[in-house]
């Protein structure tokens, strides 16, 4: 009996991610959600610029690679072209919360019926560990070598909290992938974010708090601890908005 | 066929911007994304009114950048799509133009030019010629650039632009000065013949029946990226051989040749008629495709023309292409206004007379 297998919606291409990076887990959760909803044949993914730029090689679904930060706009085009397709973006923190903030906010404001998987590891990975919009106060990175100084470098952007103020945003949840319990919950949230779209409900975004052992300068195990001790107090997990559940309850 | 203006084959009075919008719809475009900017906003306004009635998409994007990326999304699915803007807005779309090229996606982009640089002004200009024909954005790529000189051509070239975009999997740009967008003329609009193009590359969902399609411009292996560039330029060569469009006006015996497009060509025609009345042998080559540039026509003209005069609404941009095409075999002089000013027929006539008198600077 098979108890654990590769999801159908993942290709056989070896992932290029660093050892201990949590992108692999998140890719798997997305693929599992696609499999379970039986939408592989009509799903179109949008890959960002950043570590997950080559996500287009890892999912078996049709993929578009977007310019830095523009994935929600490209997704909007794909979805408007054919609303019967299930369209998701997979974006990092620099992509979604810095250079693409405008596209993110307005896709949410429009209530665009798309699913966004937002991977927040508080650092730019692909370019070698620079300060991200979500880097914590005091966090040491290549471009905040003395620690992020909020007086000159400002405060982190809390995406779920920010978007929860928009009437157009439907479902916003922050999850983490640092332990089994959180991974299970992340899976549930991602599945729901896709299901919302299948049911034509509207905009869903799942923020996944994750690690970057390489650029944090920690072992994979220590990185998970650092996430737990530093990221989670600043980025509390939970549902920030579920307009669809509220509407259903009315 | 019947449309909002009655029988479409009949002539109707339309603004250039509206003609572009209706022509795009007739050509099968059902997805328009834009952002307000003078002097092209009528395109968006027209689309906002019409698209919901025909099951299409009109979306006022949050930015020019978002608009071109929405176009990229629709283009990735293989459907006809467009955006329109004016000069400062086109600068913002530059990133998207490069990605469309890198992904080999067909799209139509309209630039109803205004004066620059910076915020510039809102009056007509042709000062985005370099941007359109040389380097709209980073990387090695070209766009097909079409320059209408009447409201009828605004419509015809829009339809043609969609076909060329689909045929060669690239961006067609309508480069119109503000005059073309704002002026009204009788125009006859007819739905073009529907052609089919191979779009097996599009993201349409695999239906679990084929390997996934990837629309992408990233090639980390330089040999691969080099190959895509060479292949793309091979296609560009085919376009240069087959798709050049221009109009020759009184060139048979011309000793002076005006080079002008858009509104500058219309002004020049008046000046040419006046000059001819005074016995000056002057004609005009009006490029309709700015890229590919009608090089051969200019080169041939250089065999019997003494001097070329490039009449432009800029500080002199197309003049470089005239010099390149003629390999500097004859003097090429400039007759220009800039910043939103249009040369008058008298000013062009004056320049023709100077050149006729031997002036070559």
Image (spheres, coloured by chain):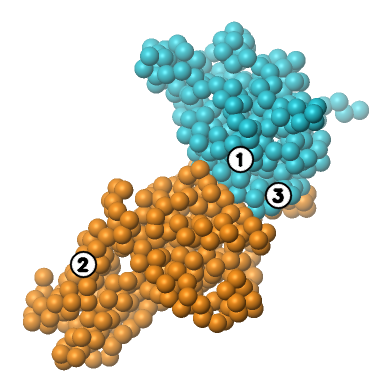
Q: Are marks 3 and 2 on the same chain?
A: no
Q: Percent x, y for residue A42?
A: 74, 47
**From this viewpoint, is residue B307 visible?**
no
Please give the letter of the chain rendered in orange.
Answer: B
Marks 2/1: CA–CA distance: 46 Å
Tag 3 residue: A83
Considering the image in quadrants, where does the C terminus of chain B appear? bottom left
Task: Tell me the residue at 39%/55% (across/down).
Answer: B38
The reply to the same-chain question for discs 3 and 1 is: yes
| Secondary structure at numbered mark 2 | strand
Give the chain letter at badge 2.
B
Q: Secondary structure at mark 3?
A: loop
Viewer-proximal residue among A165 and B4: B4
Q: Which mark is residue A198?
A: none
Rendered residue at 42%/19% (across/down): A154
Q: Report the residue marked by disc 2.
A: B336
Q: Residue B197: horizontal and vertical position, in percent?
A: 62, 68
- Residue B47 in percent (x, y) is at 55, 59
Chain assignment, label 1: A
Q: Quadrant of residue A239?
A: top right
The relative height of residue B100 versus residue A206 in the rendered view (above or below) is below
Taking the view exactly as shown, the residue that stands out farthest to the top is A229
Chain A as rendered: colour: cyan
Is A143 left or right of A162, judged from the image as shown?
left
> To which chain does the residue with label 3 belong?
A
In this orientation, which residue lies closer to the viewer: A222 or B157?
A: B157
Q: Of the two numbered discs 3 and 1 on the same chain, state the one appearing first in sequence.
A: 3
Local packing at callout 3 (Cα closer than 10 Å; few below 14, some 14-19, many 20+) is some
Assess whether mark 1 and mark 2 are in contact (beta carbons under 8 angstroms): no
- Which residue: 76% across, 47% down? A41
Cα gap from disc 3 to disc 2, whole angstroms: 49 Å
Label 1 SS: loop
């Amino acid at each position: 009996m098979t108890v654990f297998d590769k999801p159908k919606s993942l290709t056989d291409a070896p992932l290029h991610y660093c050892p201990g990076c949590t992108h692999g887990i998140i890719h798997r959760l997305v693929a599992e959600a696609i499999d379970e909803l039986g939408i592989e044949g009509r799903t179109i993914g949008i890959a960002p610029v950043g570590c997950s730029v080559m996500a287009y090689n890892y999912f078996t679904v049709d993929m578009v690679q977007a310019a830095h930060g523009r994935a929600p706009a490209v997704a909007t085009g794909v979805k408007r072209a054919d609303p019967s397709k299930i369209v998701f973006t997979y974006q990092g923190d620099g992509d979604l919360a810095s250079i693409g903030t405008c596209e993110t906010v307005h896709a949410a404001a429009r209530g665009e019926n798309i699913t966004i998987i937002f991977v927040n590891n508080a650092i730019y990975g692909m370019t070698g560990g620079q300060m991200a919009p979500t880097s914590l106060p005091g966090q040491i990175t290549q471009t905040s070598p003395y620690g992020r100084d909020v007086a000159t470098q400002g405060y982190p952007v809390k995406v779920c909290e920010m978007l929860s103020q928009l009437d157009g945003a439907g479902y916003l949840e922050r999850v983490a992938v640092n332990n089994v319990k959180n991974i299970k919950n992340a899976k549930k949230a991602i599945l729901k974010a896709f299901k919302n779209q299948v049911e034509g409900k509207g905009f869903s975004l799942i923020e996944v708090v994750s690690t970057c052992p390489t650029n944090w300068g920690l072992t994979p195990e220590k990185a998970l601890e650092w996430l737990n001790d530093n990221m989670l107090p600043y980025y509390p997990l939970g549902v920030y908005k579920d307009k669809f559940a509220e509407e259903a309850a009315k | 066929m019947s449309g909002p203006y009655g029988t479409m084959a009949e002539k109707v009075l339309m603004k250039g911007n509206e003609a572009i919008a209706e022509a795009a719809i007739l050509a099968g475009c059902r997805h328009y994304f834009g952002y307000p900017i003078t002097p092209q906003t009528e395109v968006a306004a027209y689309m906002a009114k019409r698209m919901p009635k025909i099951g299409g998409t009109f979306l006022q994007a949050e930015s020019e950048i978002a608009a071109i990326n929405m176009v990229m999304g629709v283009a990735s699915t293989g459907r006809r799509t467009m955006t329109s803007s004016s000069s400062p807005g086109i600068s913002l779309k530059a990133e998207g133009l490069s990605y469309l090229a890198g992904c080999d996606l067909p799209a139509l982009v309209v630039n109803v030019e205004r004066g620059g640089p910076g915020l510039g002004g809102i009056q007509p200009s042709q000062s985005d010629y370099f941007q359109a024909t040389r380097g709209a954005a980073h990387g090695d790529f070209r766009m097909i650039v079409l320059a209408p000189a009447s409201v009828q051509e605004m419509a015809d070239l829009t339809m043609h632009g969609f076909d060329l975009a689909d045929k060669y999997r690239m961006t067609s740009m309508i480069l119109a000065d503000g005059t073309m967008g704002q002026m009204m003329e009788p125009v006859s609009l007819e739905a073009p013949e529907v052609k089919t193009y191979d779009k097996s590359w599009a993201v349409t969902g695999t239906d679990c029946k084929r390997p996934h399609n990837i629309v992408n411009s990233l090639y980390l292996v330089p040999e691969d990226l080099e190959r895509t560039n060479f292949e793309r330029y091979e296609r560009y060569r085919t376009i240069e051989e087959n798709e050049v469009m221009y109009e020759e006006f009184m060139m048979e015996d011309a000793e002076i040749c005006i080079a002008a497009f858009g509104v500058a060509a219309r002004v020049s025609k008046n000046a040419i008629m006046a000059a001819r009345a005074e016995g000056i042998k002057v004609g005009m080559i009006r490029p309709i495709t700015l890229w590919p540039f009608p090089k051969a026509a200019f080169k041939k003209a250089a065999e019997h023309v003494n001097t070329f005069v490039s009449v432009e609404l800029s500080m002199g941009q197309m003049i470089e292409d005239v010099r390149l095409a003629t390999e500097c075999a004859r003097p090429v002089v400039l007759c220009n206004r800039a910043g939103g000013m249009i040369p008058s027929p008298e000013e062009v006539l004056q320049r023709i007379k100077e050149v006729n008198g031997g002036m070559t600077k």
